[in-house]
Amino acid sequence: MKKIIVAAAVLALVSAVNVYAGETELKVVVPSGNIQKGDTFEVDIDVTKNTGFTSFDGLIEYDPSVIKLIGAGTKADDVLVYGDEDDTKMFLTSAFIDSMVDQVPQESDSFYDGRANGKDTAADIGAIKLANYVDKTDSQLKLLKITSTGTLCTLKFQAVNSGTTPIEVKNTLFSTVEPSDRWHFDASARVTVSAGSSSGGETVTETAAETTTVSASGKSGGSSSGGGSSSGGGSSSKTSSTTQTTETQTSTNVIIEEVVEDTTQQIQPAANAVKFSDLSGVSWAEPYINDLASKGVINGYSDGTFKPNAPVKRCDFVVMLAKALDLPEGEDNFSDVSASAYYAKAVSAAKAAKIVNGNTDGTFAPNSLITRQDMMVLAKGALEYAGAEINTDDSALTSFADNAQISVYAKPGVAAMINAGVISGSNGNIQPKNNTTRAQAAVMISKLCDKVFK
């Protein structure tokens, strides 16, 4: 009997250890520089140690009076994936993160630490649930484990007010199926937002732009295409291609990007010339940005900056596009575009012009970041609306090393922009699924205006 009791005790001890046998360590990586009110910034949730897991869930928590999660950030090179070389899947996809940001959790859902009220979105209450599980098996039909370290996900925030807040990953649960292990590892880091002098981000900037009465269509006052300087004086031109190498600092690494843009147009500067203080690193885009700003198509921030490397939301690209083309207002809108939103008229106008079609469920996802390929799809729609000649021969795509990354639906749009000379690529790549920057959007729209209003 004594031996049986001892054996049972040993078995119980082994079982207890087995339940929490795994180990995964997380780290919240926040920007090292100053964050001002109105800025957007990205935060990485990194896995720094990992014995292997098949499922994860956790809560991203922060003070919504200081910052707000607006969606998934830039996909990291070391983002966690699973599967074989021919069929890999991101563990936490951008689409999933974006959907959880907009979710309205019910008050009865205890996972949200009592913050849910059944009315506000997860982003508004400062508590976003992230979860997923591996759905692929090995040759023995056992679920594959994610055993690597790297970036679990990248999150994009906007600073809405001055103050300090922790960004926490809490209530975490990692697990495996065989053997059945479960373990936890919470992590956090603090960010401080200063009052600064930013205008409050693209939303505030574009809201102000909605009230302007300047026609930015380019139908008068010369072409709105780029090239030259908008600093006043006589006309100017660039007669050769410019190569500019820029560095974009992220929270974890430095991305070196070489951009080559052909700027052979000549323009007359607008009467109310606008210049920004932070364009020295994007000289290839500077004349386009200044010219469109002078015409009221795009806006900067009250501190004199433009933030050229900041990503662009779908709604804000459409606002710029609608102003550039002087689109007439439409009669209806998408189900997720509020009538009171600053971008509602622009999106309605673009829908009526059949420049944007939205998703199959009748939504537009206005606050999602727009990729380069989607920017080109909308640009093609703009040219079609204007009756411009379009060439969608996709043989032009083969000259780019990453052409296989272009989605099938986007190929006609990308091909049209390449064939029209609007897009020349970067270092032999088209970068179709990279997020569009404000500088890239300005160059695109300026060149579109040149095609439409030449």
Image: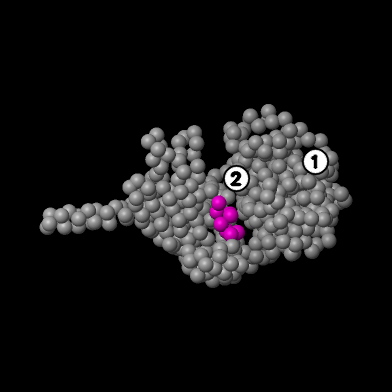
Q: Position of residue 329 (x, y in %)?
A: 82, 55
**Could you tell which of marks 1 and 2 lies nearer the N-terminus?**
1
Amino acid at pointer 1: Glu
Q: Is residue 418 visible?
A: no
| 402 over 249 or under it: above or below | above
Badge 1 marks a residue whose secondary structure is helix
Side of 345 where 26 appears, left or right: left
Side of 184 where 390 appears, left or right: right
Type of secondary structure dominating the magenta stretch? helix
Kindly indicate the quadrant of the structure image that contains residue 399: top right
Region rendered in magenta: 96-103
Q: Is residue 284 magenta?
A: no
Question: Within 10 Å of the Cα at label 1, are there few (<14), some (14-19), or many (20+) other Cα atoms?
Answer: some
- At 43% from the left and 48% from the top, the residue drawn is 150
Kindly indicate the quadrant of the structure image that contains residue 186: bottom left
Residue bearing mark 2: 434
Q: Is residue 101 magenta?
A: yes
Q: Quadrant of the C terminus?
A: top right
Q: Quadrant of the N terminus?
A: bottom left
Q: Position of residue 207 (x, y in %)?
A: 73, 63
- CA distance for labels 1 and 2: 24 Å
Q: Position of residue 60 (x, y in %)?
A: 49, 61
Badge 2 marks a residue whose secondary structure is loop
- At 50% from the left and 49% from the top, the residue drawn is 92
Q: Nearer the viewer, residue 272 or 414?
A: 414
Q: Position of residue 324 (x, y in %)?
A: 79, 51
Q: Nearer the viewer, residue 424 or 65?
A: 65
